[in-house]
Amino acid sequence: MADIIQLLPDHVANQIAAGEVVQRPASVVKELLENAIDAGATEIKLIVKDAGKTLIQVVDNGKGMSDTDARLCFERHATSKIKTAEDLFLLHTKGFRGEALASIAAIAHVELNTRQASDEVGTQIKIEGSKVVAQEVVVTPEGTSLLVKNLFFNIPARRNFLKSDAVELRHVIDEFQRVALAHPTIGFDFYHNGGELFRLPSSNNRQRIVHVFGGKTNEKLVPVEEPTEVVKIAGFVGKPEFAKKSRGEQFFFVNDRFIKSPYLHHAIMSAYEGLLKDGTQPSYYLFLDVDPATIDINIHPTKTEIKFDDEHTLYAILRSAVKHSLGQFNVAPILDFDSDPNLHTPYDYKDKKLDMPGIEVDAGFNPFKEEKSSSSQVRVKSNNFGSGNNSFRRNTSASWESLYVGLKDDDTFESKANHSEPDSFASIQFESEEVTGKLFEDDAVERPAAATYQLQKKYLVTTIKSGMVIIDQSRAHQRVLYEKFLKDITINEGVSQQLIFPLELHFSVTEIALIQTLKERLEGTGFAFESIEGDKVTITGIPLNVTESEVSIILEQLVSDFGEDIPDSGFTQTDMLAKTLCKTLAVRSGESLTVAEQEALVNNLFACTESAVSPFNRPTFITMTVEDIDKKFM
Ligand code: ADP
Ligand code: MG
């Protein structure tokens, strides 16, 4: 049989290699920025069009290349950074595999302009799909400019696989930020479609973080410093009270290279143990300096994962360094100020409020002291054992009382119940008769004023023809708001209230880009923006049913919900936006509703297209027919 194995031509090999190195425009940005850094640049300019799909250009003032090197740099395994395999363990450069430029040149139109300080003129090379189409002598500034056009022009499948500009730009920004954070002394400029996204002057670590993530970041940072023999740790962690729901700003740099490490992330999280609200993530920007001989960077083509010789020790040092900083700067107690009332159960509330009048009012001089303190004891007891059955009578009374929460002001209810037990008992009996009456009214026609009760500040109870409905107030309100926002966004009819003073909110540049993408849809709900640029959103109008103080919460939640990927499809964007809004704005359990509010909510819920489930697919209400209830009595 004939031999069938052959060596792949270089351009094919390069295309295959490109599949590993270049996944998307962001990968090109990373490789070019790293080359500029390795070339000793002090100023680097990144210019991008259409999220990098059309154009990516990196201009540096580094050491440039001779004309031979300019030609050679596009060959596979062509590198100036290592000579022997041993050099792999002495690495101080970002690159070393010598395949980035060869890969990029295989799948795009590339133009290189470069000049060394010692030369009077420079070299220009144009390459398309690995083929050199021009090489000329040019007049060009000292340093290198690499321009990459029409990424994946010769691999349509890969090109079609790219996500929307918004998503791709987000990845580009991520890569840019990682490189910029790792090299604060280098000045960076980043332009997208002609507009400046970042201008980062040469500075120190802290200033660089602030420049990248916005002015407000500064007050949130706690410094970490731990120079040990094994590893030098420096950088910052975020104060726990600023932890966010998204995992946005978490960075490890090892020898100035951004890396991902779930294991080290775990070390940080364990240092924060007990300091974070559930589901929130702290920010961190940590720089680890280790002997290059103790790590292996060459385990992943994009070099974002590395292997440490002694991960366990690193884990322990990192954890204690972060813990120490959090303790030293005494950030723990601040958390208490910020504790979210919604995290408490209504039960907790109730017990606390009941205790106060019981002790403070009754203990004084009241001649009926004995009676009252015993009545408050009963109350506390029946709350604690509310679901037990130790005393039928008292249990009944306690659960009926809870129906009153919401019908009256808490305070008046509390004091009234404490001081005049018989009085409230009488009205309880009266109410119970009325409800019983309704349950048996099988033929009742529509009752617009059907009584509603709020149970434990959590459920609304009302009657229907066949029995009763118990509605989860929070989920019901989510459903109502969700359908309203869906409609408002779709037909752009949200009513706006003008703000007297425009509201200025600060975000990171990535977050600003995301808000920009959703601008039109937000306007549909009633938001009006004066500008969205730099790290600032200026808002001049907000939806009618939103208060000014809720605006920042909404936008924070939005940024967190959309997180990594902004969906391409318009409907999914609208759906996600409506979900974020309804989740943020809906009443929660633990909130009292007036009778009018309860009735409005019930009516609005049943006017919804899909009233039975919340936007997150949980039941909004349950019904109990008279037969169900009858069965319970058998
Ligand atoms: P690597 O960075 O792994 O060496 P690359 O393909 O990225 O491989 O680059 C190949 C070589 O081209 C580098 O080793 C370097 O000598 C040279 N080079 C690339 N970019 C620049 C630049 N911006 N300035 C100077 N030299 C560069
Ligand atoms: Mg490189």
Image (cartoon, rainbow, N blue to C red):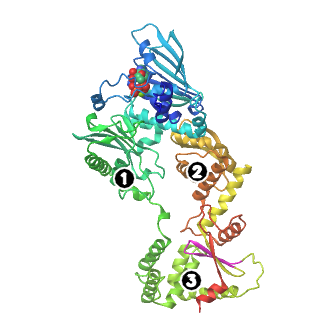
Residue position marked by numbered label 1 in the rendering? 269
Mark 2 crowdedness (10 Å alpha carbons): few <14, some 14-19, many ≥20: some
Snapshot quadrant of residue 520: top right
In the image, residue 484 sits, relative to residue 596, either above or below, namely above
N-terminal-most mark, 1 or 3: 1
Q: Is residue 244 above or below residue 624?
A: above
Instruction: Identify which residue, 166 or 516, lies in the foreground.
Output: 166
Query: The C terminus appears in which quarter of the rendering?
Result: bottom right
Query: Which residue sits furthest top?
Result: 120
Name which residue type carries label 2: Val
Q: Nearer the viewer, residue 307 or 453?
A: 307
Magenta stretch: give its range. Answer: 450-463
Picture coordinates of residue 514, whole percent (x, y): 57, 42
User: For the residues marked 1 and 2, what is the alpha-carbon distance in whole angstroms?
Assistant: 29 Å
Q: Secondary structure at mark 3?
A: helix
Instruction: Give the overall secondary structure of the magenta segment.
Output: strand
Pair 1/3: label in front: 1
Horizontal and vertical percent for residue 605?
68, 67
